[in-house]
Amino acid sequence: MPTFITIGYGDETGYHRLDDARRRTAHARDDELAASGALVGRAGSPVQVRNPDDAGVSVQPGAFLRSTLPIAGFAVIEAEDLDAAIERVSQTPCALAYGVVEVWPLQT
């Protein structure tokens, strides 16, 4: 079955705009994904790692990518196809809480 990497973007403001019932629905979807074997997690503080031409490792704090919303979490899911992957993440916290979820097919 195809594997997809998902990146959820969202912030506390959007999250708190949801009523309690919608928040429970969103977290239930995350729980369903995890129960089905998906790797689901919240984003911690990133670092950037570089090692140009194996000349030495450089580590800098902070994200390399920038967006108007912070990265809130990631998931690695399996789905029949892209449409099924989209359906699986369409009810997650970031999708419902005025954020966005990117779905990336993992090509091996």
Image (tube, rainbow, N blue to C red):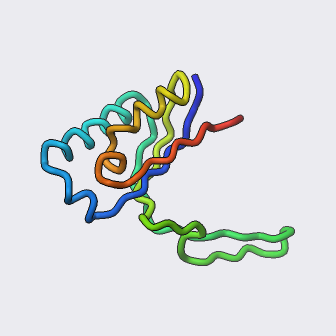
Q: Residue at x 19, y 43 (%)?
A: 22
- Classify 18 as above or below 3: below
Residue 48 horizontal/vertical position (percent): 62, 70
Residue 10 horizontal/vertical position (percent): 37, 58
- Classify 91 as above or below 59: above
Which quarter shows the N terminus? top right
Is 49 displayed left or right of 34 in the figure?
right
The image quarter containing residue 2 is: top right
Q: Nearer the viewer, residue 32 or 19?
A: 19
- Classify 31 as above or below 18: above
Is 97 displayed left or right of 54 in the figure?
left
Is 3 displayed left or right of 8 in the figure?
right
Can you name the residue that lies furthest to the left here? 20
The image quarter containing residue 29 is: top left
Residue 53 horizontal/vertical position (percent): 86, 68
Is 79 displayed left or right of 94 in the figure?
right
- Classify 35 as above or below 62: above
Q: Residue at x 71, y 35 (%)?
A: 108
| Number of marks | 0
Q: Nearer the viewer, residue 94 or 61?
A: 94
Residue 15 horizontal/vertical position (percent): 25, 57
